[in-house]
Image (spheres, rainbow, N blue to C red):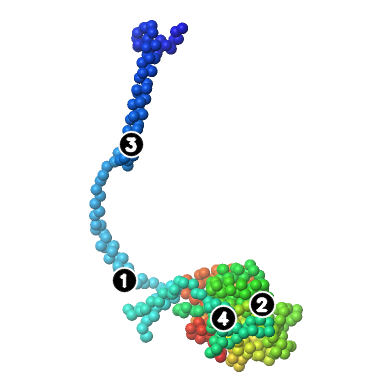
Amino acid sequence: MRVATDEILTRPLGGKPKAGSWLRSLRQARVTAPMVLGGLVAGLVLGTSILMVVGDPGGGEPSATAIIALRQSEAAPEASAQVQANVERPKTGSSSASDVENASGVTVVRPTGTAAPTDAVVIQVPSAAPIRLSAAPDPRLVERGRHGNIPRLGEGRLRALDVYARPDTGGAGPRVAILVSGLGISQAATASAITRLPPAVSLAFAPYGSDLERTVARAREAGHEALLQAPMEPFDYPDSDPGPQTLLTSSRPPENLDRLSWVMSRFSGFIGIVNYMGAKLTSDPAALEPILREIGARGLGFVDDGTSPRSMAASLATKAKVPVARAEIVLDALPRPDAIDRELARLEAQARQKGFAFASASALPMSIDRIARWAAEAEMRGIRLVPVSVALGGSGAGTRLTSNRP
């Protein structure tokens, strides 16, 4: 049977189909197809072999090579001279050389009697390495008491105030010391103070927290100087009760000293004692003086947090032979963000006026937040944060700020 497509495929264009022509075409296709296929395979193998040997970096893309010559810019010498001029000529402005030095944190030492600027200067760049505090407890400064290990004065009058203090690296500019107290009880507040506050901010721990030894060690590893809070009698005691082992005006000195021994056994590595409440006890010289003597005899300092205007601690310091420092400003006496910011501004102004200022604050989340924000910018304004041991006259204090060091 003949199919119409057979005639189309086998018939020459314009001609009539011949009988048997489609059969001959099929036979020719059977012979030709293998030859054509074999030729394509052979060509593909040959091309692949050539590519494997020599590669095809151009990828078939047209390419050209051009030589680019660099010419010296005519403006280059002039620009270089301008840069050199900028380096050699200091910029003029409203800021003095001393202001720039204070804000940069770089100490410039000049020959005696010379003013800034001068050709003979020595620039001391502070080290960026973090300050590490001495390990605690130091066996030279520990003795066994009735309640546990407590500080003692070491040989050669070696003091915990000196050994455990955060070193002050020195430098120019107004100095500010800040003490944040009430730590060790709330884990969240304690962790926030340790991590958010600059290491130069000193931390005071209440004696009632759990695992205080480890908590204080973590704070000291972060660079914070540690102090210990001692519960002291307020005027409205026992309505306001600082807690167990409170030092009382009605107690005899041996009883108060035994309670102080219990407080001091709670953890190691602290440089001094801070009052917790205590407006009544710190205003009573007969009750306070034996306590101060004991603190000084054990190589510690006493810090008055500034919350009581009647405190007699500073006036008894020389008689009791103990270093005493009193906070001049309580930053969160009015616990509001705007009020804390105002007190921080007053603290900074006082430091600029006197060269040094000391403030205290509680461990309220609001207080920690405002102090951290202020401290982040204070250094740029030339304010230098220092630990509380500077106010107590510790070994890292540099210029002594108190005259009551025994």
Horizontal and vertical percent position of residue 14: 34, 9
> Could you tell whether 137 is left or right of 252 in the image?
left
Classify mark 4: residues with Cα within 10 Å, few (<14), some (14-19) or many (20+).
some
| Mark 3 or 4, closer to the camera | 3
Instruction: Residue at 54%, 83% (x, y): give it.
Output: 162
Reading the image, the residue beneath label 1 is: 88
What amino acid type is highlighted by mark number 2?
Pro
Q: Is residue 24 visible?
A: yes
Classify mark 3: residues with Cα within 10 Å, few (<14), some (14-19) or many (20+).
few
What amino acid type is highlighted by mark number 1?
Glu
**Secondary structure beneath disc 3?**
helix
Horizontal and vertical percent position of residue 346: 55, 77
Instruction: Residue at 31%, 71% (x, y): give it.
Output: 88
Sequence-first disc among 1 and 4: 1
Reading the image, the residue beneath label 4 is: 138
Reading the image, the residue beneath label 2 is: 207
What amino acid type is highlighted by mark number 3?
Ser
Sequence-first disc among 1 and 2: 1
Position above or below: 263 against 44:
below
Q: Are marks 1 and 2 in contact (CB under 8 Å)?
A: no
**Secondary structure beneath disc 2?**
loop
> Could you tell whether 83 is left or right of 275 in the image?
left
Horizontal and vertical percent position of residue 171: 45, 78
| Mark 2 or 4, closer to the camera | 4
**Secondary structure beneath disc 4?**
loop
- Quarter of the figure with the C terminus: bottom right
Q: Which mark is drawn over residue 322? A: none
**Secondary structure beneath disc 1?**
helix
Position above or below: 134 against 50:
below
Alpha carbons under labels 1 and 2: distance apart: 59 Å
Alpha carbons under labels 3 and 1: distance apart: 66 Å
